[in-house]
């Protein structure tokens, strides 16, 4: 659990720097679909699901 808390702090700090210091409008990430734990973690950190990338 300590590791998760550390990851949470780092993620929040990256988002804070991106939006406040670099004045970004959007930060996005990709997660492989089978990574259910990763998807849950990013949702908990404030990311929102917007859709799937199509096959090229």
Image (spheres, rainbow, N blue to C red):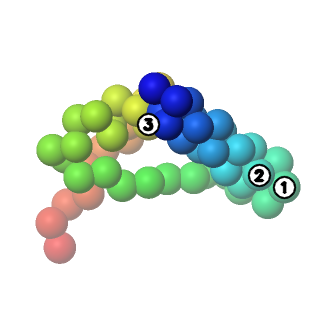
Residue 14 screen position, x and y as percent = 67, 50
Total marks shown come to 3
Q: Which mark is residue 21?
A: 1
Can residue 15 be seen by looking at this rendering?
no
| Label 3 sits on residue | 42
Residue ID at (33%, 40%): 38
Secondary structure beneath label 3: helix
Hey, which residue is sitting farthest bottom in the picture? 56
Toward which corner of the image does residue 56 lie, by quadrant? bottom left
Disc number for residue 12: none
Q: Position of residue 19 (x, y in %)?
A: 74, 49
- Residue 41 in percent (x, y) is at 41, 32
Q: Is residue 16 left or right of residue 54?
A: right
Query: Could you tell me if the residues under marks 2 and 3 are in contact, i.e. CB atoms within 8 Å?
Result: no
Residues under labels 2 and 3: Cα distance? Answer: 17 Å
For marks 1 and 3 on the same chain, the one whose residue lies earlier in the sequence: 1
Q: What whole-number distance in Å separates the C-alpha atoms at marks 1 and 2?
A: 5 Å
Label 2 SS? helix
Q: Residue at x 82, y 48 (%)?
A: 20
Q: Is residue 53 left or right of residue 44?
A: left
- Does the residue at mark 1 contact the one at mark 2 (Cβ under 8 Å)? yes
- Left or right: 43 as drawn, with respect to 54: right
Instruction: Name the mark on residue 17.
Output: 2
Q: Is residue 12 above or below residue 40?
A: below
């Amino acid at each position: 659990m300590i590791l998760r808390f550390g990851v949470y702090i780092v993620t929040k700090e990256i988002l804070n720097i991106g939006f406040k210091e670099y004045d970004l409008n959007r930060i996005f990430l990709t997660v492989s679909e089978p990574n259910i734990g990763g998807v849950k973690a990013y949702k908990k950190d404030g990311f929102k699901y917007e859709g799937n990338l199509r096959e090229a």
